[in-house]
Amino acid sequence: MRIPSSTYRFQLTSEFDLDAATEQLPYLERLGVGWVYLSPILQATPGSTHGYDVVDPSRVDDERGGREGLERFSAKARELGLGVLVDIVPNHMGVGTPRDNPWWWDVLEHGQQAAHAESFDIDWEAGGGKLLIPTVGDDDMPRERGDAIGNVTVDTEAGVLRYHSTEYPLAEGSAPEGASVREVLDNQHYQLIHWRQGDSRLNYRRFFTITSLAGIRVEDEHVFEEAHAEILDWMRHRLVDGLRIDHPDGLRDPGGYLRHLADRTRGAYVLVEKILEGDEALPADWRTAGTTGYDALGQIDRVLVDADAEEPLDELAAGADGDPVDWEQLIHEAKRAVADVSLNAEIRRIARELRATGLEDDLIEDSVAEIAAHFSVYRSYLPTGANHLADAARAATEQRPDLAASIARVLPFLEAPEAEAALRLQQTTGMIMAKAVEDRSFYRYARLTSLNEVGGDPNVFSITPERFHELQTARARDWPDAMTTLSTHDTKRGEDTRARITALSEVPEFWAESVAELQNVAPIDDNAFAQLTWQAIVGAWPASRERLTDYLEKAAREADLHTSWTNPDETFEGQLHAAVDAVFDNPVASNVVQNVVAETQEAGWSNSLTAKIVQLTMPGIPDVYQGTELWTRTLVDPDNRQSVDYSSRTAALDAILHGAVPAIDDSGAAKLLVTAACLRLRRSRPELFTEYEGITADGPAAEHALAFSRGGAITIGTRLPIGLEQGGGWIGTTIPLPEGEWIDQLTAAVFTGGKDVPLAALLQQYPVALLARS
C-alpha cells in the first residue's frame, strides 16, 4: 500500500474543474505536497458546488471535467510524482431533481418492480406501496386539505408529471385520456406530500435531514458493484491511488464495507470521515488507515487555549439565569428535539421494525428516542460498542423512570447485532448526534467558539502539553497513517479564524469589556448568541458585510432558538443585521472591533503558525485544505469553499524558494514558509519522522513551549503568546537539544546539540521552529 507524505485538498466545481486543478499541480509539487486530494468527482446534480449529491456513479462529473479531465489530471500528477486521493460518497445519492438520477427515475417510474428498487433503503409498506416525496409547498397543499395539490400538470406526450418545473415519470398506462390530475397522481408509484410531512412520514432513508439525498444499500453486493464500478476502474488504471470515505456511519455495516472495499482495491490507502467522541477509539478491525483528522484538530486547538480563562468566559456566556450553560443538558435536549421532530421519521421506522417482531408497547417511539438522545458517541458497531448502547439505555432510564419498563422491553432487540431494529438504530444515532450537536448546539454554546468544531467537545476547554504528548504517542503507535487536519470543507470556522478567537482566552477581561461596549451599540437579546456573533466578527476580520451577514443568518437558523430555516424571525435576524451594520457604520462599534483585532492579531498569527507547524509534523499524514497555506479567515460553508488565488501563492512561494525570509504580517507569507518547509522535509526525508517524544522546556516560560521530537526532526511552537510577552519572553528558558548539528528549516540557522539551548535563540525570528538533523 502506498502511503502519502501529505495531501492537499482541492474543492472542484464547474469554475475550478479538473483541468484548472491540473494547472496548479506544479505549484503543489514545489510546495512539497505528496498527494492531491480531490472532492467528489462522480456525476453530481448539475450546478452542485460540493459534489456530494451524486446522481450517476457510472461517470465522472461533466462539469468538473469528465473522465478525460481526470485522465489528464492523473497523467500530470504522475509526471510530477504526485499521488491522487479522491473523496467518494457510498452512503447516499442526490434525488432532488429526479430527471438527473437514472436510478431514482427508474424507481419512481416502476415502483417496487424497478431494477433499482432494492438500491435505495425504502419502506414501501409504510407508504402504502408508494414512495413518499415531501416536496409540496404550503400554497399548493393547505395542511387542512392533504389531498389538494396545485401547480401539477400532466404531459402525456413527454411521459412526465410536473410539479412546478420538477419532472416525475408517469407509470405506464397511468394517464388515460380524460383522467383528472388527481387520478393520474393516484396511479403513480410515488405520492407527493407536503414538505413538512417529510420529518414524520418519510419512508426512505436519507442523509441526515436532507430529503434530496437518499440513502443507498451498498451492503447489497449488486448495489456495491454498480455504485463502485467507475471508482474501481480508476484504481485498476492507476488514475487514483487512494480513497476518502464520506460518512461511513450512515452505512449499515461500515466494517464490512471497508473489508469489501479493501479486497476490491487490493488494500489501497483508505481514510474514513469518522467523528470520534472523547476517548472513543476507531474500531481496530476496520480496514482503513484512520480518520480524516478531526480528532487531531481538536487536540491542537485545545493545547493552545489558556485554561485560566475557563471560569471568566463561562460567566460571560452564561444563560439568562446567570448560571453557566450546562453542555450535557443542552445537547441532550437538542438530541431529543431532533429525534422528536426533524428525524422523527427515522425513529418511527425503528419502532415499526420492533413492532414487526410482535412487540406491543405504546411507548416504543418515546423509548427509542430517549435511548438515542443519550448516546455519547455517534454509533455502535455491534457487537463492538455494545457498552455505549447499555450506557445510553441506563441513562435514559434514569432520566425517564416512566419509560423503564418499555426500555427494558426494547433493549434486547436493540442489542442483537443482526436484528433489523438494531441495525437501523446504529444508522440513526449518528444522524441525531450530528444534527443536534454540530448543527444546533454548536451555535448555542458560545464560551469560546474556536472549540465548537466538528468532532470536538466544546465542554473540554483545554489540554496540557503533557496530555497532548500522550495523545500523539498513542497516535504514532496506533494510527500512524491517519490524516491530520486544521481545516476542511465542513469546519465551522477556518483555522486562522479559530486561532485569533483562541487568543481571546488570554484576555478575558478585555474581551468582556469589549462585548459590553458592542452590546450597548447593537444589542443582541440572546447572551450566548451575542458571544458567538462578536467572536465570529473579530475572528474573521476583515470581512465583508455580506459574508458576515450570511454567516450570522445561517448560524442563528441552525441554532433554531429564535429563528429557523422553516420559520425565520425577522425581528431577531434584524438584530444580527444591525450588529453587522454597526461594525461598518457606527464609529464606536468599528473602533471596538479594531481594538480587539489589534490586541489579538499578533497572538492569532502566533497561534496559527504553531497550529500549522504542529499539524504538519505530528504523527499522521497532514492535509492542507485549499488555500490555507496563507491566512484564510473563513467561516462555515459556503464561505470556506470560496475560490483560491493561486497566482499570489505561486509568486510568494517562488520568493521563498529563492531565499526570501518573510516577516509575520498580513500577507501570510510566513505561514506559506512554514507549510513549504514542513511538507518538503516530510517528503524528502521521511526517515526523520518515525518516532514521537515530547520535549519539556525548563525555565520561567516553560509552559509556553510546545515541543516534540519525531526522531530526526524537532518541532517547537509557542503557547499563550500574550502571556509570554507579558512575562518577559523566553529569557532564562531552554530546551534540551540532542547531540548533533541541527538546522532550522525556516531560517537556516544552525544549532549544536548535546546541551540545553535557549529558546530565545531558537525562536528569535518566528514563534516556531523546525529543526532537522544535519
Image (cartoon, rainbow, N blue to C red):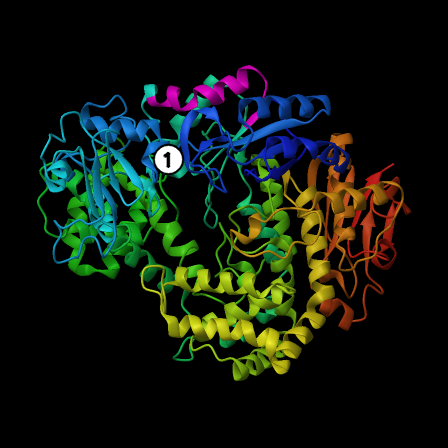
**In the image, what residue occupies the spot 14% across and 31% down?**
175
Q: Quadrant of the C terminus?
A: top right
Within-10-Å neighbours for mark 1: few <14, some 14–19, many 20+:
many
Left or right: residue 77 compared with residue 417 = right
Q: Is residue 238 magenta?
A: yes
**In the image, what residue occupies the spot 38% across and 26% down?**
256
Given residues 363 and 40, the one toward you in this image is 40
Quarter assignment of residue 679: top right
In the image, residue 77 lies at what x, y percent? 68, 25
In the image, residue 561 lies at what x, y percent? 36, 67
Left or right: residue 246 compared with residue 71 = left
**In the image, what residue occupies the spot 30% across and 54% down?**
373
Quarter assignment of residue 240: top right
Q: Which residues are magenta?
A: 223-242
Q: Quadrant of the N terminus?
A: top right
Instruction: Identify the secondary structure beneath mark 1.
Output: strand
Given residues 773 and 364, the one toward you in this image is 364
In the image, residue 359 lies at what x, y percent? 10, 41
Q: Report the amino acid beneath label 1.
A: His
Location of mark 1 (residue):
92
**In the image, what residue occupies the spot 46% across and 24% down?**
59
Note whether residue 693 is visible. Answer: yes
The majority secondary structure of the magenta stretch comes to: helix
Q: Is residue 687 magenta?
A: no
